[in-house]
Image (cartoon, rainbow, N blue to C red):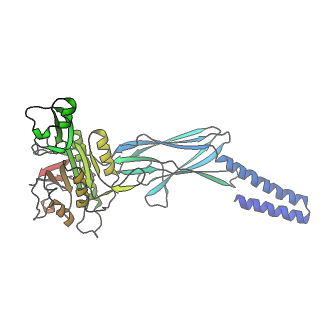
Amino acid sequence: MGRSYRDLGLAVLIIGGFSRKPAVILLGASLVAISMVALLLSKLSIRDLVYERKITSPFAFFGDQVELEVKIKNNKPLPVDVVCLDEVDNTWRFEKKDLEPHYLPYRAILANEVHLGGYETVNRKFTLTCEKRGVFAFGPATMRSQDPLGLYRSSTEVAEKDTIIVYPKVLPINDQGLQDLYPFGKNPKASWVYQDPLFLKTMRPYQPQDPLKYVDWKATARTGQLQSRVFDMAFGHRVMLCVNFTTVKNPWDAVDTSLFEVLVTAASSMAYRLVSQGFSVGLVSNGISVDRQGYHFVAECSPGNGEQGLKNLLSCLAGLGYYTFEHLSTAADRAWASHGGAYKVILTASFNPEFRELLRSPQARKDSLLVVVGDAGETDLASLPADLDYPGPVLYASLKGGWEHAGEIKLSRVS
C-alpha cells in the first residue's frame, strides 16, 4: 500500500509540474513526503526488538506440565505494535489461545500481538501438558511491525530454536511370580561365575585361588608383585533391550500406531525399572529416531547406567517415528558384536519372518529372554506362533486397556 501511495504522489507531482499549478505540486509533494516518512518509521519500528522464549525444562515425562514463557522487548524510545509469529508443533494445546494454521500439516503458528511503549517489556506465560512423546521444536519466529499509518510493513526473523524432549510413558512393572527370573524379580543378583575376558575391570594382587592364565606378567614385572586381572561379569549388570518395532505381518500393511506405542511404553518402562535396580541398559532396534538437531538415526544406544544412561535411552525412544528402516537381525548383529557380553531382553508384538529368523540365530538363543507385548488383559497365546522355535523363557507383557489407559505392565510366564 505504501508504494501505491508513493506512486500516486509522484504522479500528482508530475501532473502539477506540467500544468504549472502550485496547489497540485504541493499535494503531490506532500503525498511523497508522507510515504517516505512512513517508510522510515516502518524501518525504525522493527529495529531493536528482542524476542525470547524460555521453557522450564528441556526434558519432560509423558503427562508432565511445562511452562513456556515468551518475552518481547522494545529497546528504543519509539512505541510500536508488534505481531510475533512463533512456529510450534500442532500437538500442543494452549489454554485460551488458538493456534493459526501452518503450511506444514504437523506445525502451527503461535501468534502474540502486543503494544510496546519505549523501552517496555511484555511477558506472556503458557502452561503446556505433555500429551505425546517426541522431540518438539519451538521456533523459528517472525516479528512484524508497521508504521502508524499502516502503509509499510517490516519483518525480521528470529532463527533461534528451543527444543523439548518428551519421554515415553513409564509404567510400574508387575512381575509377581517371576522372582526367580533374571533380570526381573525383587532382588536380581548378578553372577560372577562367568567372567568376560574382553572387559577388564581392574588389577589386584594375586590370590591363591586365581587361575594362572589371569596373571598379568607385565604388571607383575613393573610392580615386583604378582598381579591378577579381574574381568567384568559375562553379562551381570549389562542388559540390551532388543525391540522389534514391526507391528504388521506384511510390509505393505499400514502401521498399527497403537501397538507401536505399546511397544515403546513397554521398552521405556523396562529400561526405567532395570536402571533403577543398578543395571546398565542399552537398546538395539529396527526403528528410526530423531535428535534435537532433526537428524535421523537408527534407534540404538550402548549400555549405560545411572541418570545419564537412562536419559540417553529414553531420548532415543522419544524420537521414534512410525516406521522401520532395516531388519532387526541386521541391527542386532551389529550391536551384539560390540556388546556380546550383555544379557538380551527381546521385545516384540509380531512374528514376521525376519524376526523369527533372528530368534533362530545363536546369539539370540543364548543368555536371552523373549517378551511378547500386547494390550490384552490376559496372556494372548493366539499371538504366539505354534511352531515357535525358541529355547529360552517367554513372557507376556500386558498393558490392559492400551498404553493410554494402562496403570501397570503385567508380566506373566508363557513358557
- Rendered residue at 36%/47% (across/down): 166
Q: Tell me the residue at 18%/61% (across/down).
A: 358
Near-viewer residue (228 or 57): 228
Look at the image and tell me in which quarter the N terminus lies. Answer: bottom right
Q: Is residue 292 above or below residue 224?
A: below
Q: Is any part of residue 407 visible from this angle?
A: no
The answer to whether residue 92 is left or right of residue 324 is right
What residue occupies the far top of the structure in this picture?
Answer: 224
What is the x, y in percent for residue 216?
A: 17, 37
User: Left of 334 or right of it: where is 74?
Assistant: right
- Classify the position of the C terminus by image quarter: bottom left
Kindly give the residue lying farthest to the right in the view shown.
20
As rendered, which of 177 and 301 lies closer to the eye? 301
Instruction: In the rendered view, tell whether residue 196 sits above or below residue 362.
Output: above
Foreground residue among 162 and 6: 162
Indicate the quadrant where residue 221 lies.
Answer: top left
Residue 29: percent from the left, percent from the top? 83, 56
Can you give x and y, in whole percent of width and height, for residue 317 in the image?
A: 31, 51
For residue 80, above or below residue 328? above
60 horizontally vs 195: left or right: right
Front-most of 379 and 242?
242
Q: Position of residue 411 (x, y in %)?
A: 15, 49
Q: Does the rendering let one see residue 55?
A: yes
Total label count?
Answer: 0
